[in-house]
Image (spheres, helix red, strand yellow):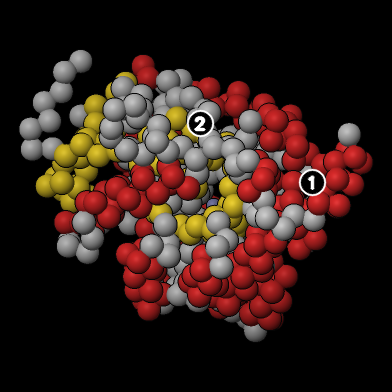
Amino acid sequence: ESLDATGLHVLPGAIDVHVHFREPGYTHKEDWETGTAAAAMGGTTTVFEMPNTHPPTRSIVELRQKQDAAKKAYVDYGIYGLLAEDNIAELPGLIKGGVNAFKCFMGNTFGNLPSPSTGAMLEGFEIIAPTGLRISLHAETASIMAWRQKRLMEAGRNDPLAHVAARPAVVAAEAVARAAILAEWTGARLHVLHISSGLELGPLRDAKARGVDITGGTCPCYLLLDTRDYATLGSVIRVNPPVREASDSEAIWAALKDGTVDLVETDHAPHTPEEKTKAVIWEADCGFPGVETQMPLMLNEVARGRMSVEDYVRWSAENPAKRFGLWPVKGRIAAGAHADIAVVDLARTETIRAAALHSRAKVTPFEGKDVTGIPVHTLVRGRFVQKDRTLVTEARGHGQQVTDVQRMPASAVRNADKTLAAEIARARA
Ligand code: DOR
Ligand code: ZN
Ligand code: ZN
């Protein structure tokens, strides 16, 4: 197939290390076919999918179930295994079974998975560290938020901004600092998901300066929305962690530019319009789809002069590939790399319409926004999955699980408690 790319730009396809595709268990919200179709339409060629499905990806049994569901994928994918209070014994099985990373829900969110105690986290980090697989954190501390939400509800607060009050930035910053100390001890590699505040940047910077292998990601909503949008968007904007002050967005932009925040991810969190639109904020599901709108929203910031195309490629493809072990095979355009490509028209303007999204969740906080910079073709390993703004339906099932995730040699692990690790290994043998 030939392609006339006159006037177009050829970028590495985006690598989104944070999507929720809901299958198995919640397929009325999304499934692997609709989620990866949305990715293909959005110029995203690799996704890492989260474990808060039903059942959650807590052992090799559920991993195999998820791999089976993922056979429908249009784009390549990694699969997260869960690190929780009650599945520490399953971690070796998940590792052997081929998970690409782990997810630790320090804060409660959709799926209501119980947050692990610090003890379980430490033990989990010790088990995972020698593999070099990265552990992505939902860095908010559940016990603190439970107190605050209870008090707000007692005070009769049920408006959208009460959600921000229930989950203040200090909750996220405290979780980042605590997890970073555990990583410093064990040598585990961490990724702080969805950075939403300026306050998280301090502990993240400090940990990096101490030599902890810790990275950070943020999402378009934290860069482009702020508390002024709650009045117009209502419960649709509800997301964990919450969208905060304009000063937080400013701080996150600066942190992307100086490298403290490494990458842009979407937290693609599909819920139906009915589940999102509630009079009482506490009843609205958290999150919204993002994998199809990320590239247009960010390229629109290029068009507005807020960042360069080179910045974008570093945050959307190069850094995700490097930090999650896919480099040099993915995340760049070069000999020897996979032909994972987004061909973009930097001058084309479209209006974001929820009804036109390929996600099953037809709702977005960016409804009606004009964006300039559109992926017009997407190729995964050399094959078109989107052509001329149309999904290539024959490419369903072309997606494969990424197998190139780097494993760090065990010798790189620093302060793991060798005695305990040996005891644990013996007990599990
Ligand atoms: O708002 C959110 N929604 N935050 C999360 O961390 C999870 C996600 C979901 O799965 O719906
Ligand atoms: Zn999260
Ligand atoms: Zn998420």
Residue drawn 42% across the image and 38% down it: 327
Frontmost residue, 205 versus 73: 205
Do the CB atoms of the residues marked 1 and 2 lie less than 8 Å apart?
Answer: no
* Residue found at the very far left of the displayed protein: 6
Camera-nearest label, 1 or 2: 2
**Where's the N terminus, which quadrant?**
top left
Residue drawn 19% across the image and 47% down it: 373
The amino acid on which the numbered mark 1 sits, given as a three-letter code, is Ile
Residue 125 lies, in percent from the top left, at 71, 52
Residue denoted by label 1? 88
In which quarter of the view is residue 144 placed?
A: bottom right
Q: Element at badge 1?
A: helix
Residue 266 lies, in percent from the top left, at 43, 51
**Where's the C terminus, which quadrant?**
top right
**Above-or-below relation of 252 to 32:** below
Q: Which numbered circle lies on residue 404? A: 2
Q: Which numbered circle lies on residue 277? A: none
* Residue found at the very far bottom of the displayed protein: 155
Q: Element at badge 2?
A: loop
The amino acid on which the numbered mark 2 sits, given as a three-letter code, is Asp
Frontmost residue, 160 versus 280: 160
**Does mark 2's beta carbon lie closer than 8 Å to ligand 3?**
no
Q: Badge 1 local density, few (<14 within 10 Å), some, or many (20+)?
A: many
* Residue found at the very far front of the displayed protein: 411
Viewed as shown, does residue 11 lie left or right of 153?
Answer: left
Q: Is residue 359 visible?
A: no
